[in-house]
Image: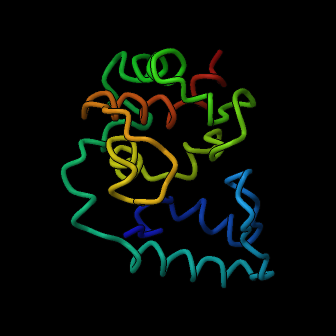
């Protein structure tokens, strides 16, 4: 079962509720705008972050150290970049930083949108989380899933520093 409180970060969700925009370009469905006040969006985001989570699934992913800071192992994001860009062909479906296909979710804002623990679990086996997803299980090891997550979650920081 998908729990939105596991998937997204609360701050991103609050901004999205105020101003929804397409995430999956090929999807016919779209979140309507409810013209929520800042307080209403904050209350809904807080509820989703607190109540709509699966606390068991968040344990033991090793994803705590994939986003920014001194806890990210040296070379982890670089390994993830190689996997994403060269070995797995992720841009065949996904867009990142204005490059790639538009058939699957644009990952440019993954840093702000996705929870690191959820992302590592998703990369390991997306069909366990969402059986009908077109995203294939590509057979990543735990370390490879952490590496791809580190690349996606640190993408903007590295580009801005160049």
Residue drawn at the location 65% of the way across and 15% of the way down: 162
Compared with 84, 50 (above or below) is below
Residue toward you, 38 or 82: 82
Q: Answer left or right for 117 relative to 156.
A: left
On the image, the x and y values in percent for residue 39 come to 66, 82
Compared with 20, 159 (above or below) is above
Residue toward you, 88 or 53: 88
Residue lying farthest to the left in this orientation: 60
Q: Quadrant of residue 157?
A: top right
Residue drawn at the location 51% of the way across and 15% of the way down: 86
Q: Answer left or right for 57 relative to 130.
A: left
Residue drawn at the location 30% of the way across and 44% of the way down: 64
On the image, the x and y values in percent for residue 105 come to 63, 47
Compared with 131, 90 (above or below) is above
Q: Quadrant of residue 7?
A: bottom left
Residue drawn at the location 37% of the way across and 70% of the way down: 1
Residue toward you, 98 or 125: 125
């Amino acid at each position: 079962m998908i729990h939105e409180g596991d998937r997204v970060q609360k701050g991103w969700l609050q901004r999205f509720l105020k101003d929804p925009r397409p995430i999956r370009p090929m999807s016919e469905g779209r979140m309507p705008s409810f013209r929520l006040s800042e307080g209403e969006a904050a209350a809904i985001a807080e509820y989703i972050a607190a109540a709509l989570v699966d606390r068991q699934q968040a344990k033991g992913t090793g994803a705590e150290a994939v986003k920014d800071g001194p806890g990210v192992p040296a070379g982890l994001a670089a390994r993830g970049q190689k996997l994403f860009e060269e070995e797995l062909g992720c841009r065949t479906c996904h867009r990142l930083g204005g490059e790639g296909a538009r058939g699957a979710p644009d990952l440019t804002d993954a840093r702000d949108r996705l929870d690191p623990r959820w992302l590592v679990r998703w990369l390991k086996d997306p069909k366990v989380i969402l059986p009908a997803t077109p995203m294939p299980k590509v057979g990543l090891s735990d370390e490879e899933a952490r590496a791809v997550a580190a690349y996606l979650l640190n993408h903007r920081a590295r580009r801005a520093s160049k």
